[in-house]
Amino acid sequence: MKKLARIMAGNFLIAIAAIYFIESSGFLCGGITGIGLVFKNIFHIPLSYTVFVVNIVMLILAWTILGHTLAASALISSLLYPLLLTIIEYIPYIPRFSDPWINVIFGGGLMGAGIGTVLRAGASSGGMDIPALIVNTKTGIPVSIVLYGMDMVILCAQLAYAPIENLPYSILLVLISSAMVNITMHKQSCVLCPPESFQS
């Protein structure tokens, strides 16, 4: 029960960060949330729909390539995160903060704390850490480098609709998120992930 509570709390923090501080501010972010923002802003597909579909694809990849144990560890987050996004998206009042630094600090901080909480519970947060782990398994490239590379591609894709002046804030948000993952997570508890791996 304690593990499940941590996973639920972590995903709740990630969803709050995504809706209240990142999406509402127009900032960019990496990971599966960043992919969801691309589809929302270009194709007008709700964020939660894209996150759910991509998570299911990643679960199938994890199951077939990385094994049942890792796929099982990612199952809860893969289903819970889009569900929480859907619930929060339909709350009538979404607070919007005009100060960009509030969105950067709280968006990055809550996102990183949420991911770190899930990893600390010994579970996978799903999403883009799965292809990073696959690349690491096949090529030996460190997971963190693969994640950074994918995040840069996702950030660049968001520049198709986001103003360029949002980019410096967004980079800081990603850095704060990454730092909070490491602060929150006890690496010895993340039994399924290489020590250097995290998702931003």
Image: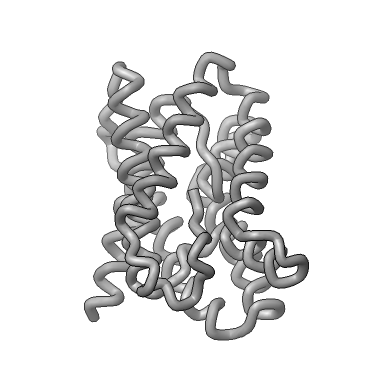
Nearest the viewer among 129 and 19 is: 129
Residue 12 is drawn in which quadrant?
Answer: bottom left
31 relative to 10 in the view: left or right: right
Instruction: Say which of 38 and 91 sits in front.
Output: 38
Residue 69 % position (x, y): 53, 84
Count of numbered labels shown in the rendering: 0
Q: Which residue is drawn at 28% across and 23% down?
A: 97
Colour scheme in use: one colour
Q: Which of 154 and 26 is in front in this view?
A: 154
Instruction: Look at 52% across and 31% down and name the residue there.
Output: 28
In the image, farthest residue toward the bottom: 68
Relative to residue 59, is residue 13 depicted above or below? above
Q: Percent from the top left, x then y, of residue 159? A: 63, 25
Residue 6 percent across, percent down from the top left: 27, 68
* Residue 90 appearing in the image: no
Q: Is 12 rendered above or below residue 150?
A: below
Give the residue displayed 29% in from the left and 42% down from the top. Answer: 91
Give the vertical position of 168 relative to 84 (above or below). Answer: above
Residue 112 x/y as whole percent? 37, 49
In the foreground, 38 or 90: 38
Q: Is residue 53 left or right of residue 91?
A: right
Q: Does 197 sit above or below residue 45?
A: below
Q: Is residue 154 visible?
A: yes
- Residue at 38 percent across and 54 percent down: it is 182
Q: In which quarter of the image is residue 131?
A: bottom right
The quadrant in which the N terminus is found is bottom left
